[in-house]
Structures are given as C-alpha cells and as structure tokens.
Amino acid sequence: MLEPSHQGIRDAARSDRYSKEVAQRHRRRSRLSAVLPDDPSTSSDREFDVTSALTLPSGSPLASSWPEAPSGSQPLPFELDHLLALRVPGLIATRRHIHSHPELSGQEFETAALIHRELSLAGLKPRLLPKGNGVICDIDGRPDGPVIALRADIDALPLTDPKDVPYRSTVDGVCHACGHDVHTTVMLGVGMLLAQLADLGQLDGRVRLIFQPAEEILPCGSLEVIEAGGLDDVVQIFAVHCDPNLPVGRVGLRVGPITAAADNVTVRLTGPGGHTARPHLTVDLVDALGRLVTEVPALVSRRVPANSGLLLVFGHASAGTRYNVIPSEASAAGTLRVMDRDTWDQAPKIVAQVVRDVIAPTGATVDLEYLRGRPPVTNDARAIGVLTAATAASLGPEGIAETPQSMGGEDFSWYLEHVPGALARLGVGRDGPNVDLHRASFDVDERAIPVGVRLMVQTALRALAAAR
C-alpha cells in the first residue's frame, strides 16, 4: 500500500502538465488524426499552441479551482477528487474543442482520433471501431473481476450553431445540440481517473469505455459497437444523458422505461398527375397527402391503449411544384414514438393497415417504408440501485431526482437488450430559460462535467463491487 501522501497521483508532474496543456493538443481546425501519438508519453514540446477560443478566462471558477467533493458527498478514493480538480480546466477545454469541431453521425473520425489520443496519453490502450469513427477502451484492473461498461455517444446534429460563444461550431450546418460533447468529455475524465486506480492495483475488475458513433441516425451506432464485441463479457452497462431541465448537481433516475421507442416512417404516394381544373380525371395527390398527415396519426393512436403513449408526428411533407398542376408524386416522413415495448412490437403492422385504409379511397398508390429504430430504454432495478448509491455518494442524497419517462428515443436501449444496465439524466441546466435538446442554441452549464465524472467513477466502482 502506498503512503497516504502519495495515494491517487501516479505522476504528479504529468497530471499537473495535463491540466495546463490539454487544450494545446486541440488547435483550431487541426486535423486530429494527424496528431495521434505513436508514444503515449508524448512530451509537451510536440504539442500545438493553445488558441483563445479554447482558453478559460483567468479568474474563472472553472479555471482556478473546483471543490474536491460537494457538500454532503463522499470523497473519491485515493485522492482522485484532487486529481479531478487539477484536470477540470483541461476537460472544459476538451469539451469546447469538440463543440467547436462537431461531426455528423457516421463521420466522427476526427473526434474518435481525439479520444484515442487522450486515452493513450493517460496510459491506456484504446482501439478504434472497424470504421474508425468510434473507440473502445478497457481499463484493466483485477483480472478475475467482472467487466462493467460505460458508454458515451459522440456524434453531432445537422444544425447551424447560432450561439455567440468562443467555442461556437466552426463547421457549417453541424453542431452539438444534444450534449454528446459533454458525454464524451465526462467519459474521458472517467478514464483518466480510473487509469490511476488501475495503476495502484485498486480497480476490482475491468471497466470498458465505449465511445459510440451514430446515435442520432438509423441504423443505430450501438449495433455497430455490439457487432464489434463491445459487450463481450460485460455484466452491466451505464450511461448518462444531459438534461437541461435539471440543474447542475441533480441526477434524474428512474426504474423501468426512461425513454420511448422511436421508429422512422416514410410514405410515398404516386398517381398519373394532371390538371388542377380536372381532378376527377386523375388522382389528387395533394388531397391524399393532406389526409395522410392529418388522419393517420389520430387513427393510429386509436388502435392502441391510451397509456401506451403512441405518437406519430410527420416532420416533412412534400407534393408538387406548380399551383395549377396535380403532381404525380408526394411524400411524407416522420417519427413514431411509443412508451411500451409491447405496443412497439405491434406498431409496424398497425401503421401499415391505417395508411392503406386512409389512402385507398383516393386511388393513390402507396409505398410505405417503416424503419425500425430503437426500443425504449428500460432501466434495470439493480442498475438503478447502483446509480442511486453513486449519486448519493457523489452529490449527497439531495442530488437524487425522480425523472419522468421521455418521448425521446435513445439507442442505448439496444445494449440493454443484451445486458442489464441503466441510463441517468445529468443536470446541465443554466441560469435563465433553458433551451431544449435538439435546438441549435442548446448549451450547458460546464460545471456539470466534473459532476458527471464523479458520478460515473462512483458508478463504476460500486458496480464492480456489487458484481463480485
């Protein structure tokens, strides 16, 4: 056993250097894959110059200090709270870099390179997913211990960032409007702290970090991770998701379904086309499209129990280009969301029948594409027990918040089809009116990052202990 004065700090000089220089590795508009280190001990002489956009202002509470443990909480073992406090400025800089350099679903190659590099610098051995746009990294502790997985999603959305901040997106039409930059940064922080415990021989098993691409699209990136062996030997899996409706220092927990199932529905209508003066001689596709988008959602909801929460909403509808021409093609696309698994299983058949019934009298030809998305995220009771204890340890009992089931979809659900686990909602709410997820102006209170790190470190340690 090491002497108490040395516990938790593998290399004090290296840890302090990291907190001061992390942003130097993230030069604005740099090609991240071009700076992957061949040697994890890369010296600071080879790092890039820091930019003003990624530098925290002097005197900022985030830049100067962070409480080693919130009031009412339990300290992390082996002085990890002190190490986390040193690294908070670097984590904030990393989040800002990721935010200013977002990548769309399936294209997260530079983000994956950044993750690979940071984990390598922490002395770990990450591996890229087969496509190169995601990362899996095992932190090896006791070889006969269980395997616990922690997942972060890393992709951004196709939205233009309107925020007036130094870390505004530099990529036209792409921004992090769902908090995945925070999820990624939190998990990097977790990896750096757990690597210290592993080096000290104080990790009771293996913790697998999963940095997953393509959460926002179909097919889901979680399926790629599973196919690549991401769940091999895993006994439990955990994740957090930003929640702007909760303040920093609060974590939303729920046993059972916490999100809805979400599928994509696309309907294409065709007909011969014609003149708007003689609709009786053709098929009026604009009329048919109007019936589709107004009648089908209401009728579908009448085919299932009201408490199933089925919701079909069309977000796109298109027909024609001229005011006096009846088009030969029309289409509508939307999402179907439902709260329970049984109704989700029946949904494709119900939607297909209702669409046919509504469109049949119009004479239009129907082509329905129903793309299965993701089932509800259903939190395991034992996993929520672990998260509850971890939240109390990280934030005190007052940090625990009950959270309702959301109509949003999350492909974390596919992991839970294979192993038990749970997703928690991490409070990131800012002062003043909060902006909801998937709005381009969405931003977070960055104090949530060290909160998330402490939460997930506590979660991993408690899950390993409970699984022994």
Image: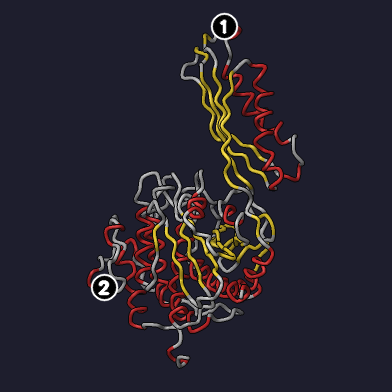
Sequence-wise, the earlier of marks 1 and 2 is 2
Q: From what the image shows, is residue 270 above or below residue 57?
A: above
Residue shown at 40% from the left, 73% from the top? 63
Q: Helix, strand, or loop for circle 2?
A: helix
Q: Is residue 315 visible?
A: yes
Quarter of the image where one finds residue 71: bottom right
- Residue type indicated by callout 2: Ser
List the residue tagged with mark 2: 44
Secondary structure state at the residue bearing disc 1: loop
Residue 120 has which mark?
none
Residue that label 1 marks: 278
Image-quadrant location for residue 460: bottom right
Name the image quarter holding the C terminus. Answer: bottom right
98 to the left or right of 412: left
Q: Residue 48 at what x, y percent from top left?
A: 25, 65
Q: Is residue 139 left or right of residue 70?
A: left
Residue at the limit of the structure toward the left, as seen here = 45
The three-letter code of the residue at mark 1 reads Arg
Q: Residue at x 27, y 62 (%)?
A: 35
Toward the viewer: 300 or 249?
300
Task: Establish if 58 lies above or below 435.
Answer: below
